[in-house]
Amino acid sequence: MIVTAQPSLQALQIGVLVQNQIDTQTIHDFCRQINPKIKVHAITQANFSADVLKGKQLDVLILDDEVKNIEANDLIAELKVRYTALSIIVLTRKSDRKRAVEAMKSGATDYIFKRDLNRDIFEKSLKFCFEKSIHNKELKQRNVLIEALFEQSNDALFLSDANFNLIEFNRELEVFFDTTLRSRNNLLDLTKKPQFEQLHKLLSQDEQLLNAEFSFEKNDKRSYYSISVKDILLPELGARKLGTIYDVTARKLAQKEQLRSEKLQLTARMARIMAHEVRNPLTNISLSLDFVSDLLKDDEEGQMYVEIMERNTSRINTMIDDLLQSSKPFELSYQNFKVTDLVNGALVQTNDRRELLDIALETNIADGAFEFFEDLEKLKLVLINLITNALEAVQGCENPKLTLEVTNTTEALILVLIDNGKGMSDDVSEHLFDAFFSARKGGMGLGMTTVKNVVEGHDGKIVVKSQEHVGTEFIIKLPILNHSHSSI
């Protein structure tokens, strides 16, 4: 709450612009009787101008609406625009109530009929103007403070009408929409772009919003926001909406990283339990199968069942290996290698399946001879995992195709894998690298976790862009300079 020092009547500066000199003297006498320290300034038509009023710093102007060559209502309207805190008391004829009403509509604070002018009526009008002046000054202070808070806020703020037509907004809202805004721009129209689909749905709801979260792609990164919209009723202005959009990306990423860390810890505990509780009896089963295999070496049907059991015990062992690999720290083995060594090494291990499924492949390597100093085998594993997933994504699609592009700058090696498969929803894309999350039936949800661990272990970044029924794009950026050769 803003507290303004409360001046007394004695501090008032009053200007008097009337037709009759007698009225000027009368008002002067009234002021002296009310408080001798009130300062009265007689203003004549000859020396009158709006700048004169400003120079005298008047609080109240007593204006006769019959002063020659002055259109009182036009003057009142002009003065209220230039000096919002100035109070104006209009002296008018008692017989012409219509003129008094018109003066009030133009912005006059009060009016007095000349025939009723006496000390008591004048004092009441003066006190009313005095209180109105204080209120106006407080209101002006509040407006200045609100405007400052509005402009200095790090959040995007807006005031709109009931239909989301903008009335006021700050610079941060323009930054959010990445455009220059004007009053009357409609928020619902601004959010019709595909990236603002979630926000458009929220705003289209016929209800108030409180910390409703949404996200969209911004600068090749997913940004997270929270919006609150409150319906307010302003005197004389009607229903309005006051909204705030907060950037919660840092908080969301911290929460996701914490959840990911907890899942990896859980993975490690499960891996230890499985290694201890499963592998010991599995070893006994494998040894027993060797013995049974010798006993049934001449039994063709028996050997078939032994092979089935051996394949499944081997599968269980592989699953345990995958689980251990995804959760435990591992050392990066650095070596110099050409980009073609990385790409060809991954393609060799995936070409049989790709050719069997008759899936086209297009490769574009900008500089295959370019040498890179990182862990070749770990990065090869990353590409194998991504290509394998892409092959599964394009199965059953018309004209299935993979595109692998490799470029390099002075700062990074960039690998891009694109497929025209079934794509993923935003929810699947968001959780794709989480441990135990898999959109594939029967998947353990550890392959993509390993991919992310390896990329980040090389101080790199991996980004996924996907659209359902269109396809998926993976972008990996691996820094060339300033490597941190440490364990993942």
Image (tube, rainbow, N blue to C red):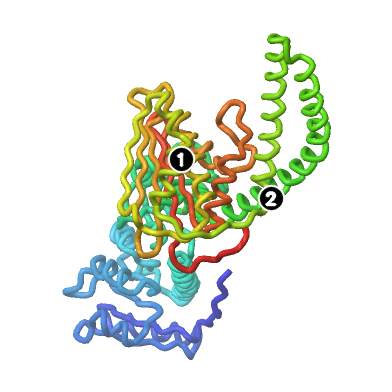
Q: Position of residue 296 (x, y in %)?
A: 76, 14
**What is the crowding at mark 2: few (fewer than 14 residues within 10 Å), some, or many (at least 20)?**
some
> Identity of the amino acid at label 1?
Gln
Q: Where is residue 79 in the image (x, y as percent from the top left)?
A: 29, 72
| Left or right position of 88 against 452 | left
Query: Does the CB distance between marks 1 and 2 fall below 8 Å?
Result: no
Which labelled disc corresponds to residue 198? 1
Say which residue appears at 48% left-offset and 29% top-offset. 392
| Left or right position of 427 against 197 | right
- Disc 2 secondary structure class: loop
Between 365 and 118, the residue placed more toward the observer is 365
Give above or below for 157 relative to 421: below
Give above or below for 100 relative to 10: above
Which labelled disc corresponds to residue 487? none
Between 34 and 189, the residue placed more toward the observer is 189
Name the residue tied to disc 2: 328
- Tell which residue pokes out farthest to the bottom in this image: 37
Q: Can you tell which quarter of the image residue 209 is in?
A: top right
Say which residue appears at 77% left-offset and 40% top-offset. 275
Q: Earlier in the sequence, mark 1 or mark 2?
A: 1
Q: Position of residue 360 (x, y in %)?
A: 34, 30
Between 175 and 6, the residue placed more toward the observer is 175
